[in-house]
Amino acid sequence: MDGLRLGYIERNGLEYLENTDLSKLNNFSALNAEAVAQAAGLFGTPVYIYDEGLILRKCRQCLDIPNAYGVSVRYAMKANSNRNLLRLITSAGLHLDASSLNEAVRAHMAGVPYDSIMLTTQEVYAGPEMSRLQELLLEGLKYNVCSLRQLSLIRDFAADNGLAPGIRIHPGIGSGESATRNTGDDYACFGIHLSDVDEAVGIAGERGLKFRHIHEHIGSGADSGMWRQNIDLELSIIGKYFPDAGTVCFGGGLKEARMPDEAPADICLLGSYAKEKIIEFFDKTGRKLHVEIEPGTYIVANSGYVVTRVIDKKSTSRSNFIVTDGGMEINARPLLYGSRHPVYIVSSDGKRVRYSDFHDTCGDYSAVVAGKCCESGDCQTLAPEGHSVPRAMAEPDIGDFAVIGGAGAYCSSMAPFNYNSHTQIPEALYTSDGDLKLIRRRQTLAQILENEIDI
């Protein structure tokens, strides 16, 4: 299977562009087998690697979506908040969406000005935290109120200082990769519910506050049809309740395809639909709305890989298992959501990709990809119900690399990395010119213990 192959492959009745360079892991990233082995030699395994060129390409795609009267893109930094990635993404022209006060401060510490950051959070501030929020608002931080209590607590300060908070609406409809990633239906509690919007407008109006930024987010990995439905709904809400609004944010959740049988959101089509509806809104009201979106996964998910090493192989009457030196403590998404991630088997010498989900070199072997934590759920190949599922692959040798793809979003930032007293693993950037740069050191055991107090 060495060399180049052209054309398309068929999986599940669908055609996918074939990876024509079998030294590369797939057909969309510059990362190759040699870089995998080099990273392992430089930083050890496991290690996260991020493809700089792909991140920048995704940023450009989002900035170039069709729009009527302007578009701004805010990167949802909770997806991956390494300061080097924040600098890279903001240097490409994106702003930031923060989900906590700490995230906002962290971004500012990375060099991002507060007026480029929007805080949309479940947190409710009082005491020193409220004082800190007020300081940052005066420095330019933008703030979406997400509950009547948040609005009541910030209203007087905002009015006294001529500030105009945004408002996040709970639309009552939602969609996501899993039930736990749906943030818009009535099982979720994000934003001010439609039934409370009249009260919110009244609370603000008592001090002359006007909402100029209206925000909704229906879920991560949202269905495109539901995304279009939300565009219609949010514009109708603005028309009914918010005569002073100049910006509409449709949130994030743009679906990315981690696996070859998945289809990503067509952001050009979604942008065209939004543009059409924004123009219709202008024709009806004479109001031009600026659009914002807040992608996280779409920007960084497929840029990220976790390089693990095969340390053992086992079998039961049901399955083969390959045991790697990294599992749920570096990527908890399969366990949390039943998410699927591609697995690439790379030879230990870094000369070839022995198996990739983007080309068929696997033969008859299949295995569950397991980690080293003491949990049956510590597998990278899990069914949504929670049991392990073998994946077709080339049989690896001990010492080969099992590379987990789609690991740029909600892996490093969400990992339970100290479980079983494992240390947080390093992160590296694979630059556009082919260099590997360390952007986070490996944690030490002493760092795990440093905040424990003897009594």
Image (tube, helix red, strand yellow):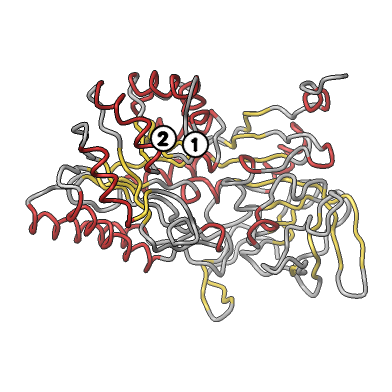
Q: Which mark is residue 381?
A: none
The amino acid on which the numbered mark 2 sits, given as a three-letter code, is Leu
Left or right, residue 285 beside residue 134: left
Comparing marks 2 and 1, which lies closer to the viewer? Answer: 1
| Label drawn at residue 123 | 1
Q: Residue at x 20, y 51 (%)?
A: 241
| Image location of residue 206, percent across then percent down | 21, 35
What residue did someone put label 2 on?
Answer: 119
- Secondary element at tag 2: strand
Kindly identify the residue that appears in the image at 71 percent across and 37 percent down: 39
Q: CA distance from mark 2 to mark 1?
A: 10 Å
Amino acid residing under circle 1 = Glu
Circle 1 residues within 10 Å: few <14, some 14–19, many ≥20: few
Q: Is residue 418 left or right of residue 337?
A: right
Q: Nearer the viewer, residue 201 or 323?
A: 201
Image location of residue 25, percent across then percent down: 63, 54
Q: Position of residue 360 (x, y in %)?
A: 67, 70
Compared to residue 380, the image places residue 434 above or below, namely above
Which one is in front, 272 or 123?
123
| Quadrant in which the C terminus is drawn | top right
- Number of marks present in the image shown: 2
Horizontal side of residue 373 vs 435, given as left or right: right
The one nearer the camera, 364 or 157, is 157
The residue drawn where x is 80% and y is 64% is: 368
User: Between 60 and 264, which is closer to the camera in this rendering?
Assistant: 264
Tell me which corner region of the image, top left, top right, bottom left or bottom right, holds residue 160.
top left
Q: Quadrant of the N terminus?
A: bottom right
Taking the image as shown, residue 17 lies to the left or right of residue 117, namely: right
Q: Position of residue 443 (x, y in %)?
A: 75, 28
Per the image, label 1 sits on a secondary structure element best described as loop
The answer to whether residue 197 is above or below residue 261 is above
